[in-house]
Image (cartoon, rainbow, N blue to C red):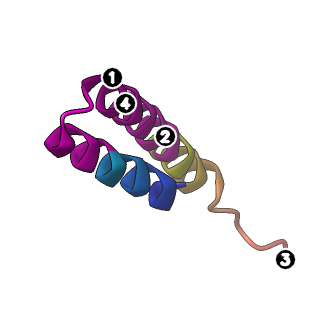
Amino acid sequence: MLYYALVFLIVALVAAVLGFGGIAGAAAGIAKILFFVFLVLFVLSLIFGRRRPAV
């Protein structure tokens, strides 16, 4: 998911350089959403992923 966020960020940067403001804004918004979803899932996996082995 972090990969897709970076891809959309690069697409947004390229579109902004070429002058496509609407596409750049949309791609940057998607990149931001994907990044925050990645952060939430990462934190949840850190919290709930640590299970003690059953003895």
Query: Does 23 lie within the magenta span?
Result: yes
**Closer to the eye: label 2 or 3:** 2
Q: Which residue is mark 1?
A: 22
Q: Check disc 3 and give the amino acid type.
A: Val
Q: Are marks 3 and 4 in contact (CB under 8 Å)?
A: no
User: Is the residue marked by circle 3 packed among few (<14), some (14-19), or many (20+) residues within 10 Å?
Assistant: few
SS at circle 1 = helix
Cβ–Cβ under 8 Å for marks 2 and 4: no
What secondary structure predominates along the stretch shown in magenta? helix
- Which numbered disc flags the more N-terminal residue, 3 or 1? 1
Badge 2 vs badge 3, beta-carbon distance below 8 Å? no
Question: From mark 1 to mark 2, how far is it between C-alphas?
Answer: 18 Å
Q: Earlier in the sequence, mark 3 or mark 4?
A: 4
Q: Which residue is mark 4?
A: 23
- Pick the residue in front: 1 or 43: 1
Q: Earlier in the sequence, mark 1 or mark 2?
A: 1
Residue designated by label 2: 34
- What are the residue bounds of the magenta stretch? 12-38
Q: Crowding near pointer 4: few (<14 within 10 Å), some, many (20+)? A: some
Q: Amino acid at mark 2?
A: Leu
Q: Residue furthest left?
A: 17
Residue drawn at the location 50% of the way across and 46% of the way down: 38
Looking at the image, residue 25 sits to the left or right of residue 54; the answer is left
* Residue 27 percent across, percent down from the top left: 39, 35
- Label 3, label 4: how far apart the Cα atoms are: 55 Å
Q: Nearer the viewer, mark 3 or mark 4?
A: 4
Note whether 38 is above or below 6 in the view shown: above
Label 2 or label 4, whichever comes before in sequence order: 4
